[in-house]
Amino acid sequence: MAAGPRTMSLGALIAAREAGRAKPDLMVALASDAIRRLDGDIRAFTHVAERPTISDAGPLSGIAIGVKDIFDTFDMPTGYGSPAYGDYQPASDAAIVSLARRRGATIIGKTVTTEFAWFEPGVTVNPHNREHTPGGSSSGSAAAVAAGMVPAAIGTQTGGSVIRPAAFCGVAGYKPSYRLLPVTGMKFFSPSLDTAGLFAASVTDVALLAELLTGRPLSAEPVEDGTARVGVFFCRELDSADPEMQRALERAAECAEAAGFEVRAVKEPEALASARDAHATIQNFEAGLALGPELERFPLLLSERLADLIRLGQEISPADYDDARRLARRARAATHPLFDDVDIILTPSAPGAAPKGLSSTGDPRFNRLWTLMGTPAVNIPGFLDAAGLPLGIQAVGRFGRDRRLLSVAARLEKAMRESAG
């Protein structure tokens, strides 16, 4: 496997701090130096703290975190990816930012988001190939971790905005069970879908980040051979994946078998297939409400396609919105039995590797359903296509069973890396 950008391991940094080999100020200095050297090329940050606050206490002491510029920060500009907000600076932090500070983390800067965390791209490029998209909407968070500028970053997902950029950039992206992470203080696009998520170099690292940030038992536990059950999810979208992506999914299943996991095929229930299209109705209706004020006040400062989307959402009837929500509820009920016989299910994280060009952030077709279901998902990095670009595998777990998902995914990641050489 060809070498990509060199990432920072959260686990290695914390182990060095605990062993007395690294102090928090040195750990943050490493990140600051990496940003100075690399971000002129990658353009992952919209703002970098000149004098970052460094704590000597807390489980995340010394850990520099990039925060997607869709979350409020009292001491840094928050532009939501839009010129409509210019140098706007909120009076207080978003809840997840405040939580990170209380846990000892250093908020090193704000990372690039697409416009209001939708599809209009920012300026960030893919660290693996500057001519390719890093994905979106959490473009800067994924790229900052992939380029080795920070060991951890915070993003959001409404459709596929954590899993897809993590896949394109070759890092772990974790979308937890709905509302496991707080979203107060983020700029909402679709409140019943918007989910805060995390990025780190590996599944083990992102699980450790989740535990140290929340205080919940989420770090990956050892998984013994023969004790995990893995399903390969055969959905109606699977044939639309690139051949290399389909082969990567097959290889992931082979790695699971080699790791001693029980592997079986899982067919998509009709209720889930029917609900897939409900995501757009729910998202757009809520975006019409959430961003209607911006369209009224700043019509010339919004991209044309976002303005059109807001208008489209405002034209959706409450009855159609309620019908879509009913479809989603039925699908969530049908999701629970999927995990009676498996611990996790595997799907592509994206149709293929990151597309060439920066005018698009890619297609979230393999992610939307799981955001709608509220189930936890994580991108497992490890495979590359023939051009050396990352191919990510999405692992999905039962709602509320985030630790089991992360534990099995971490063991599978190890097997995938061993297989890739």
Image (cartoon, rainbow, N blue to C red):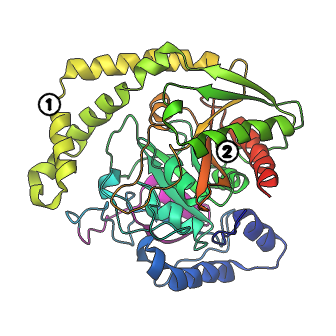
How many residues crowd around disc 2 within 10 Å: few (fewer than 14), some, or many (20 or more)? few
Where residue 216 is drawn, which disc sits there?
2
Q: Earlier in the sequence, mark 1 or mark 2?
A: 2
Instruction: Classify residue 308 as left or right of residue 239.
Output: left
Give the vertical position of 56 relative to 285 (above or below).
below
Q: Which residue is tagged 1?
A: 315
Which callout, 1 or 2, points to the residue nearer the camera?
Answer: 1
- Magenta range is 86-112
Q: Does the residue at mark 1 contact the one at mark 2 (Cβ under 8 Å)?
A: no
Answer whether residue 49 is visible to the viewer in this image: no
Q: How many marks?
A: 2
Residue type at tag 2? Arg
- Which amino acid does the dot numbered 1 rest on? Glu
Where disc 2 sits, the SS reads loop
Please name whichever residue, 134 or 319, is drawn nearer the observer in this view of the structure: 134
Query: On the rendered image, what quadrant is the C terminus found in?
Result: bottom right
In the rendered image, residue 103 lying in the magenta stretch gets the answer: yes
